[in-house]
Amino acid sequence: MNDERAANAIDKKIGQRVRTRRLEIGMSQERLAELLGVTFQQVQKYEKGVNRIAASRLHDIALSMDMPIAKFFEGLGGRASAGVAESSKDYIDDALATPEGAQLMSLFASIKSKKVRRQVLELVKALTEEASEGKRG
């Protein structure tokens, strides 16, 4: 049975973007919940895409996090029934939705030296290659 009110891939992606923005600005789930007048468990459900976010609630979330509401929908296009394509942007969003990803981006952005940024990039490439070789072997 397909419940049209159930959260779908786009709802999950919007929830993920809420989490990404919240982490980006250093806001806790508790603080966002307080601003919205809901429990932090409800914020967790929104972020995981378990519960759909009503348009009025998304408007409140956007205002609370000083983000244009349209940013939550960027790149989604298409119909909800078609699903959400997994582009490289989706993988970046996935990474930034984690506390480690948000922290890594923040720290990387604070590096002023181009040389050091290149060295960090080379280190990450080497670690990625080593990790993928470990999976094969």
Image: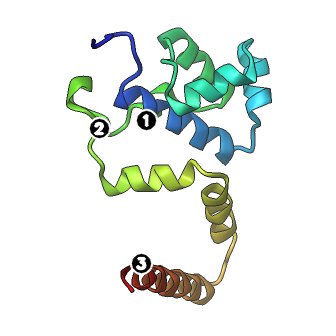
Q: Looking at the image, is mark 3 or mark 2 nearer the viewer?
A: 3
Q: Looking at the image, is mark 1 or mark 3 nearer the viewer?
A: 3
Q: Label 1, secondary structure: give it.
A: helix
The Cα atoms of the two marked residues, 2 and 1, are separated by: 8 Å
Colouring chosen for the image of the structure: rainbow
Name the residue beneath numbered marker 2: 84
Decide: marks 1, 3 in contact (CB < 8 A)? no
Residue nearer the viewer, 77 or 12:
12
Residue nearer the viewer, 119 or 128:
128
Decide: marks 3, 2 in contact (CB < 8 A)? no
Mark 3 closeness class: few <14, some 14–19, many ≥20 residues within 10 Å: few
Outermost front residue: 137
Quarter of the image with the N terminus in it: top left
The Cα atoms of the two marked residues, 1 and 3, are separated by: 28 Å
**For residue 41, which quarter of the picture?**
top right
- Residue 22 location in percent, x, y? 66, 38
Q: On the rendered structure, is 10 left or right of 14?
A: left
**For residue 57, which quarter of the picture?**
top right
Residue in the picture at 72% in, 14% down:
38
